[in-house]
Amino acid sequence: MPCFLSKKASKIKPYAAGAQPSQDGVIKLNTNENPYPPSPKAIEAYKNFRPESLRLYPRPDGGELKKAAAALYGLREDNVFCGNGSDEVLALSFYAFFDGGIMFPDVTYSFYPVWAELFGISYKTLPVNDDFTIPADKLTGRGIVLANPNAPTGIALDLCEIESILKRNKDHVVLIDEAYSFFGAQSAAPLIEKYPNLLVVCTLSKAYSLAGLRAGFALGQPRLIEGLENVKDSFNSYPLDAVAQAVGSAALSDTAYYEEIAKKITATRDKTIKRLREMGFSVTDSKTNFIFAGKKGVDAADLKNFLEKNKIFVRHWDAPRISGYLRISVGTDEQMEILLSRIKEYISR
Ligand SMILES: *Cc1c(COP(=O)(O)O)cnc(C)c1O
């Protein structure tokens, strides 16, 4: 029988997303979703959406969402590119900017090597330090892709460190993936005016509590945005549907609501980190809505399975350097209490 598949389709090892369990009563701490609902303004925009208007194609450039993102960051619309989730924005960016190869830390978002493979981009990994911090001065010589804060470690670089990476790599695009920058890290967006090589990628899935909507955007100087538009229009002209444009733009305009829930999440995070450290876990200094924790003598994969049997889902990677750790999304205080008591039960048996 003929193989039917392209070489890429048959050989590529795709990104494995966290499980979306369908059973009831689950405490879902495995994909960094927000435990709080989207802004009331976003919900109202959803309810006010006129389904009859779905007869028409949406604005190809993201429309209202593009406007709202520009306003939020004090930029112009030609500084913004919108996509179907930031994963799509990232994929198109890999295609648009990185013919010359890229570099990223060895411990980072595991989608990066997949896009590099898919598009035939050569990539080098930079080993992170033993404490999972990034030796940022060694990021140099090719395109740079950096999640800041990093995933799954949660550790953030300061803005001045990002700026020195930009200065050192003036001939290459430096892509900063800010999926989690709302939870305590500094955004690099204010540097866009100054650095034509900077692209900042943002999502509505985490801080904005709209993972199910699928919306993300990139910020950069018009030259980079044009490159992304070219690639998009060679693939799918309408990545953001009309509902996502209406609801996403309403969300971006409600900063006050999102600051309030981010404050709740970071308070819950810091309390939980403290408790885990008291139980002997080594926990990174997270600037995100997740916690990265491991304990000597505890088999992280086994702990993950134990929690899962108790309907608590967390994430574990059987990968070099991080197999002793779990990544735990920050839920509500009540959810974290249940998690902590199950962990206590596990380590004291
Ligand atoms: C969640 C996440 C994204 C992707 O988010 P979308 O839902 O596709 O917008 C991108 N980068 C990192 C590091 C993430 O954790």
Image: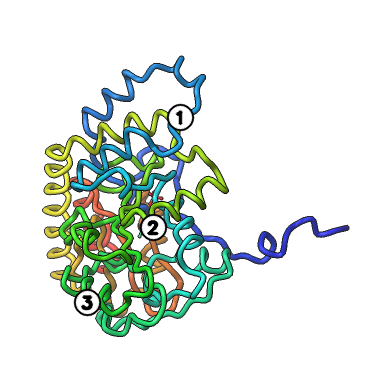
Q: Which mark is residue 164?
A: 3
Report whether residue 192 is seen.
Answer: yes
Q: Is residue 332 rendered to the left or right of residue 88?
A: left
Residue 216 vertical placement versus 275 (above, below): above
Report whether residue 27 is seen.
Answer: no
- Which residue is outermost to the front? 223
Name the quadrant containing residue 121. bottom right
Residue 165 vertical placement versus 17 (above, below): below
The three-letter code of the residue at mark 2 reads Leu
The three-letter code of the residue at mark 3 reads Ser
The three-letter code of the residue at mark 1 reads Pro
Viewer-proximal residue among 23 and 161 = 161
Location of mark 1 (residue): 58
Mark 1 touches mark 3? (CB < 8 Å): no
Instruction: Tell me the element at label 2.
Output: helix
Residue at (28%, 37%) from the top-left corner? Answer: 67
Tell me how many marks there are: 3
